[in-house]
Each structure stands twice: as C-alpha cells, then as structure tokens.
Amino acid sequence: MQARFRQSDVRFEVANGHLVRTVTAADGRSYIHRCSRDVYESVAHAMQSVGPDGATVDTLAVALGAPYTQVNVALEFLKERSCVQTRCRRNYPASDIVFEDAMIEFLALVEEPKEVR
C-alpha cells in the first residue's frame, strides 16, 4: 500500500502546451501528472457555470468526458491560483469570470522564466 506524501513540494509549469504538476516528497520520491490545454480550458469553462451544488473532480470528469487525472491537475492549479474555492469537499468559482482568471493564470505560467536544472 502506498503512503501519501505528508510533506511535499508541488510545482506547476507549462511544457509543450500541457499543464504539468510535479509533486516531490521530503524523501525525494516524486510523481508528475499532465493536463492538456483543451482539458484545462474545458474545466475552466465548466467551473464558470457550476451551480449551487458545486463540483468535484468526479463530476467534472464525467460531465466533460475527460481523464480524471487531467481534470484533477487542472482543478488543483485553479485552487492554488485562487480561481476556485473549496467548501465541504466541493469546488466553486471564486469569481464571476473564472474562465478569464484561469486563462490569465495559465498564460502567466507560460511566461514565467524556467529554472535551470
């Protein structure tokens, strides 16, 4: 059984048009998940029209017909950048223009200088 990463470093970057989420544990273990720009934009559009019941990764993935992992990466980025708020395990738009906010954050990430490794 795999243990969750209790303390981890989460980084987002855009590579080859995909949103990339890299999670690194304190012990050095890591994993990388990606989300295509099409799925990211679909999630942002879907969050724009979320009703009073909010949305979860599951409901978004089913509604969009998109891979669960890609929807999760998009949603985690939107939460980190305060485009989406989570209350009682459900996600809600943080503003009336969540799609525009989401695209601003995505494009700002594209323009960030890359780390030299």
Image (cartoon, rainbow, N blue to C red):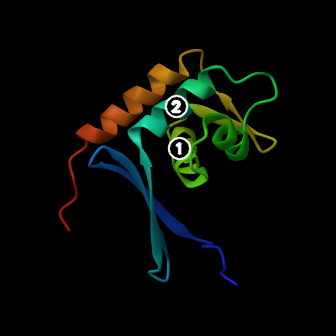
Please report whichever mark, 2 or 1, sits nearer to the chain's N-terminal start: 2
On residue 41, the disc is none
User: Which quarter of the figure is the N terminus placed in?
Assistant: bottom right
- Residue, x 50% and y 77% (percent of image)? 26
Q: Give the quarter of the image for residue 17.
A: top left
- Amino acid bearing label 2: Ser
Residue occupying image coordinates x 55% and y 34%: 43
Mark 1 belongs to which amino acid? Glu
Is residue 94 among what the camera can see? Answer: no
Q: State whether residue 21 appears in this view.
A: yes
Could you say where residue 82 lies in the image, as x and y percent from the top left?
55, 34
| Residue 42 badge | 2
Q: Where is 64 relative to 7, above or below? A: above
In this rendered view, identify the residue nearer to me: 61 or 81: 61
Indicate the position of residue 69 as horizontal and vertical percent values: 56, 54
Give the camera-side residue of 115 and 21.
Answer: 21
Give the position of the C terminus as an image quadrant: bottom left
Q: Is residue 13 above or below residue 43?
A: below
Taking the view exactly as shown, the residue that stands out farthest to the left is 116
Label number found at residue 80? 1
